[in-house]
Amino acid sequence: MHLSRGAYYADFFVLPIVGLALAGGSLFRANLVQSLIWGIICLSGVVTWTLLEYVLHRYVLHHVPGFEQMHDAHHADPLASVGAPIWVTLPMLCLCGLLPLWWPVGFLQASGLTTGWCSAIFGTSLSIMRAIAGTLTTAPTSIAGSAATPNTTRPRMDGTSA
């Protein structure tokens, strides 16, 4: 789905606020043990979202009609504002994470997992933006950061030098 610039970047503002609100609401009266448990669950949320995102990307975005077409538009123009709007992301976080876990395991654990998911989505979005910004630079930079002297000896993924 093509988004306005504001809608495209809304994740950068909304997800940290949601994560901080969940963390604050959970940890406000938590003792040390509860806080440690919350932290472990939050980290497990980052890991599980990373795995979920891989599965969704590999099997849903590349093979399910509708999603596949939207994702193809993203591949055709990676700099376009194509993605899921925050009004889709937030309900999905609530419906798939926070709410189903809240009743059986409690708000502390449910918010930990959901905060981990928010953190992972935010981190992924930030990494993508940094990668796109890197493609927009006009002069290559060396490890020292000087645009005047490109780094031509950087090793490639296959082990050879560039």
Image: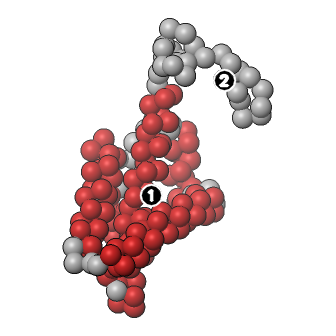
How many neighbours does mark 2 have within 10 angstroms: few (below 14), some (14-19), or many (20 or more)?
A: few
| Between 77 and 12, the one nearer to me in the picture | 12
Q: Which residue does the image show at 39% across and 73% down from the upper left?
A: 36
* Residue 53 appears anywhere in the view: no
Q: Specify which label sits upstream in the sequence, 2 or 1.
A: 1
Mark 1 is surrounded, within 10 Å at the Cα level, by few (under 14), some (14 to 19) or many (20 or more) other residues, namely many
Q: Is residue 88 left or right of residue 40?
A: left
Q: Residue 78 at what x, y percent from top left? A: 50, 38
Circle 1 SS class = helix
Q: Residue at x 40, y 83 (%)?
A: 101
Residue 155 in the image: state x and y as whole percent.
70, 27
Q: On the image, which quarter does residue 158 sit in?
A: top right
Amino acid at pointer 2: Arg
Seen at 56% across and 42% down, the residue is: 75
Question: In the image, which is nearer the foreground, mark 2 or mark 1?
Answer: 2
Q: Please name the residue that numbered disc 2 is placed on.
A: 154
On the image, the x and y values in percent for residue 156 come to 71, 29
Which quarter shows the C terminus? top right
Residues marked 2 and 1 touching at CB (< 8 Å): no
> Which residue has dot 1 on it?
120
- Comparing 54 with 59, the one in front is 54
Q: Which image quarter: residue 151? A: top right
Residue drawn where x is 22% and y is 78% of the image: 29
Residue most extreme to the front:
32
Three-letter code for the amino acid on which mark 1 is drawn: Ala
Figure quadrant of residue 95: bottom left
